[in-house]
Each structure stands twice: as C-alpha cells, then as structure tokens.
Amino acid sequence: MSALKALIKRDTKLFFKDKGMFFTSLITPLILLVLYGTFLGNVYEQTFRNALEAAGALAPDKLIGGCVGGELVSSLLAVCCVTVAFCSNMLMVQDKVSGARRDLTISPVKHSTLALGYYLSTLGVTLIICYAAMAVCLVYIGGVGWYLTAVDVLMIALDIFLLVMFGTALSSIINHFLSSQGQISAVGTVISAGYGFLCGAYMPISQFSEGLQKVISFLPGTYGTSLLRNHALRGVFEEMGHQHFPAEVVEAIKDSVDCNLYFFGHQVAIGTMYLVLGGAVIMLVAAYVLLNLLRGSKQK
C-alpha cells in the first residue's frame, strides 16, 4: 500500500510539474465553453425558438437561456471527462519514452501496483480539472438561466465521476500500447476530434442517419452524455410543464437533444443508462488489469 501511495504521489506531482500538460488540460474546458457559447449558442437558441413557435408556444428568454445553457454545458462536460483523461494519462507513455518505467520495474514494485498507480493518479487529476470545469459551467448557467436544484447538481457531479472513470480506463487501455511521443499526439488528436461526435456532444444523435444512430447506441459514452443532458435540463423541462407547454412539445425537445435515447426503437431508462456506463467502466478496468497481468507474466 505504501508503494501505491508513493506512485500516485509521484505521478500526480509530475503531472502538475509539467506546466504545459497541466495548463493544456485546464484551459481546454474553458476554451470549449467559449467556443460552444460563441458558435453553437445562437444555433441552439434559434432551434429551440423555432420548435416552440412552430408548436404555438412562447417561452421567455430565461427559459430559452436555460435550454441552451444546459445543452452546451452537458456537451462540454461529456467531452472533457474523456479528452482530459487522455491528456492526464500521457505520463504513462512518457515514462516509456524516457525510460522511467524501466527503472520503476527494476525496483521491487509489482506491475499491477504500477498500473494501478497510473490509473488512480489519472483519475484524481482528471476529476480535479473536470470538477473545476463544472464549477465554471454552473456560473455560466447561472448567468443564462438557472433551473437546477441541489439534487441536479449532485447528479451532474455523479455523472462526471462515472464518465471520468470511463475515460481514464479507456485511455489506460489505449496508452498501454503506445510507446512514442508521436503516437501520443496522434491518438490525442483523433480522440479530441472524433469523440465529441461519437458521444453526441457536438451534434445530437437524433440528427444522424438511422443506421448510424443504431451503431452509436452501442457506445457507452453516448449514455454518459444523455445522463448529463437529463440532469442539466431536468429543471428546464419541469418549468415548461409549470408553464403549461404541450407535453408532446416537451417530449419532442427531449428527443431532439438526446435526453430520450432509443435502442432499436425502445426508449432507454435513466437507470439502464447508469447500468450501461457502470458496466463499461467495470469491463474496461478489468481489461486494463488483465493486460498488465499478461505483460508482467511475459517479462518474468
């Protein structure tokens, strides 16, 4: 246990000591928030207004702001929980490049302990950054339209925790096979560019073709995004009910922003989304452990 604590402390210190890596991870969510608010905010706002006006319902600016803010924030957090995990987990590969990992394996440290140290350190660092991003996002929502309750905020925090565990496990498995700086850059670029589309953060899944929707419905990240959407927008939809918006209009908006997800035509319940995401975390962590056990046995 003392060796594990030492490894976690060592990995965490090295991450924060690398100013470039730390500030890149920290600034990325802020940059995304500015970009989302600047380029997507008006698009989302006009979409909501057109949908409501077509149904003969008029919404106050604050309610529209709450809709836009909830969708933007959920998109941002869904992406950051995974992309920041990949950035935070680069130390695993950098240790291979620098030879530090070879030095660590020479010492009486088990491969499983070394692997767990990387995972827990990455998990802790990513949670710090993502919760800091969450705080900034809550300030943003407070400025455009606040309809969240304390329970909603706690559920968003839980969703972030699960998504960070998922992102950390996924990055640990992929980084396990990387061994150069160029590979780190290539994987980081692909994940940053592609993950937002695959999880429905950049564009709602409802806008994709039917075939692509079915494929994406198998990806765990999709359900993590939907969980964040549901908890970030729950208060907004409740307020729409209080203002006597037609139920079919509210459901149509939920469908359009992926609060309602469908698996081959069947709506997926919130509890099932948690089971899918939690099950994916368990499977990925188990695969990561197995990879390191096999690596350790080969080197012996």
Image (tube, rainbow, N blue to C red):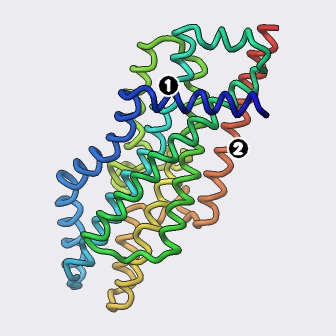
- Distance Cα–Cα, label 1 vs label 2: 22 Å
Q: Which type of secondary structure does the marked residue at label 2 adopt?
A: helix
Q: Is residue 193 visible?
A: no
> Tag on residue 264?
none
Q: Position of residue 261 (x, y in %)?
A: 49, 61
Question: Is 275 or 72 nearer to us in this picture?
Answer: 72
Q: Quadrant of the N terminus?
A: top right
Q: Position of residue 129 (x, y in %)?
A: 45, 45
- Tell me which corner region of the image, top left, top right, bottom left or bottom right, holds residue 263: bottom right
Q: Quadrant of the C terminus?
A: top right
Residue topped by disc 1: 90
User: Quick check: 221 above or below 65?
Assistant: above
Q: Seen in the image, is 87 located left or right of residue 296?
A: left
Amino acid type at image mark 1: Met
Q: Position of residue 28 (x, y in %)?
A: 33, 40
Question: Is 12 or 66 nearer to us in this picture?
Answer: 12
Q: Seen in the image, is 109 located left or right of residue 216?
A: right
Q: Which type of secondary structure does the marked residue at label 1 adopt?
A: helix
Of the residues under marks 1 and 2, which one precedes in the sequence? 1
Q: Is residue 78 visible?
A: yes
Crowding at dot 2, Cα within 10 Å, few <14 / some 14-19 / many 20+, comes out as some
- Say which residue appears at 50% left-offset and 42% top-offset: 126
Residue topped by disc 2: 282
